[in-house]
Image (cartoon, rainbow, N blue to C red):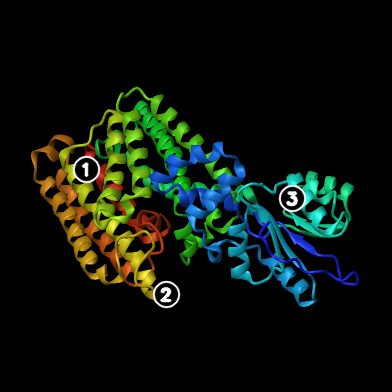
Amino acid sequence: MDNQVYTQIPASEPLPLCVDLDGTLVRTDTLFDTFITAARKISTLVKIPFWLIQGKAKFKANLAQEAGLDAALLPYNGPLLAYLHEQKSRGRYLVLATAANQSIAHKVNQHLRLFDEIIASDETQNLRGEKKAEALAERFGTRGFDYIGNSRIDLSVWKYASSGILVNVSDHVAKRAEELVPIEKRFTDNRLQGRDVLKALRPHQWMKNMLVFIPIITAGAFIEPSAILNAVVLFAAFCCTASGIYIVNDLYDLEADRQHPRKCQRPFASGSLSLGLGFILAPILIILGIAFAGALASAWTMPLILCYGLLSITYSVKLKELPLVDVFTLAGLYTLRLFAGGEATGYHVSFWLLAFSGFIFLALAIVKRTSELSSLVMIGRQEATRRGYTTSDINILKMFGISSTFVSSLVVALYIHDQAAKAVYEFPHLLWFIVPLMLLWQCRIWLSTERGYMQDDPIVYAGKDWVSWCIGILVMAVIVMAHIRW
């Protein structure tokens, strides 16, 4: 396969131990990894259909060449890797036997420096299932090797093996494997996949979608059933769409997340969820979100959800790499939720609310970016992957953000003395209490960022912060009292 001279194994030595790569040695599928990396280039996307016509082996080879996979970033199976090192120390002959292209297999071995031999796919032959079984039987003889695998497709290899080692297989596959070959060992990941799926959906981020309720709150429509119901349906639409886009973002940012000290623990980056599942979940969730939006009477809700989805994906693919454009886009996505809430409930967003939200959301977007750069300083890095900033930009970003913070409060102060406030509120002068409360909250957010406490989106952070909850309740109380006729 790769023109290497194979080592002759003495009959007295333990049988060679052949190890599968995808889903076994690494907690991911390198085919999906290379596809995601290569597909970032438009020129590559155009070529993919022509590669597929040439066969799967050629397709894998072209993807591997185009992607340039970094084997050091792959999520390796720690317990299995420790076991292999133990076997290696005892002098056992280790073979990396994989359906992945041989260039990927060699990169993995160059990183691990563990295997004595590599048997992998090339441009003409895809060593998967029966093909891999035949190659191993031809090389070592039937029952002349032991095999470590992880899935139903590996049953065809275990038929020829002397013994098997199972890695994260289902009970059904394990039972079938036991009928074919003696099982030497079984590695099981005890993590609950359902919890990882929920984590990938990022339900803690749904708090941002509560913004769709702001128009009915500021309008005083606290107990209007139809408005509340429409806002709830729109909230569900944004939650589904946002979760689908978070998965798209996680898949697209796979390599960058694996280099990040915290994001490397995300389900797809860490390998706790298969990349294939992400390709299924993302479109389902986005379609479900669009369907919720389409169920609303307003003709604007579905276009707004589509606009939100398109802008979010564009942000994930490119805009997040552009300095300043990224934070203005984030602010726009926050404001879009607010605007959609007004359209869905019939309580349209006023000029004043749009002005206030524009400045406060820009400030919060800059908080998020500043906290990310500050975390890089702590680990000694100068710039973030796929971001247009370096740590030297922190001070100027703080100036932009803090200025925007105070302007947002100024907008509220000007609104209180405008005729628009008197037309909506019975006692608009009570709204003056909101100005110091909002300033206190935003200054606290900036202070938390400066001290290194801000490890997440500021709105998500506020959802976990009891002081933010207290301030939010006080602001709500002020708005209610300003509406009520005493």
Q: CA distance from mark 2 to mark 3?
A: 43 Å
* Sequence-first disc among 3 and 1: 3
Q: What residue is disc 2 on?
A: 379
Residue 296 position in % (x across, y down): 37, 25
For badge 1, the amino acid type reads: Ala
Discs 2/3, front: 3
Q: Give SS at disc 3.
A: helix
**Dot 2 and dot 1 residues touching (CB under 8 Å):** no
- Quadrant that contains the N terminus: bottom right
Q: What residue is disc 3 on?
A: 132
Discs 2/1, front: 2
Q: How many marks?
A: 3
Discs 3/1, front: 3
230 on left or right of 190: left
Name, please, the residue furthest toward the right.
12
10 Å neighbourhood of mark 2: few (<14), some, or many (≥20)?
A: few
10 Å neighbourhood of mark 3: few (<14), some, or many (≥20)?
A: many
* Image-quadrant location for residue 385: bottom left
Residue 329 position in % (x across, y down): 28, 48
For badge 2, the amino acid type reads: Ile
Task: Kindly tell me whether residue 429 is visible in this rendering.
Answer: yes
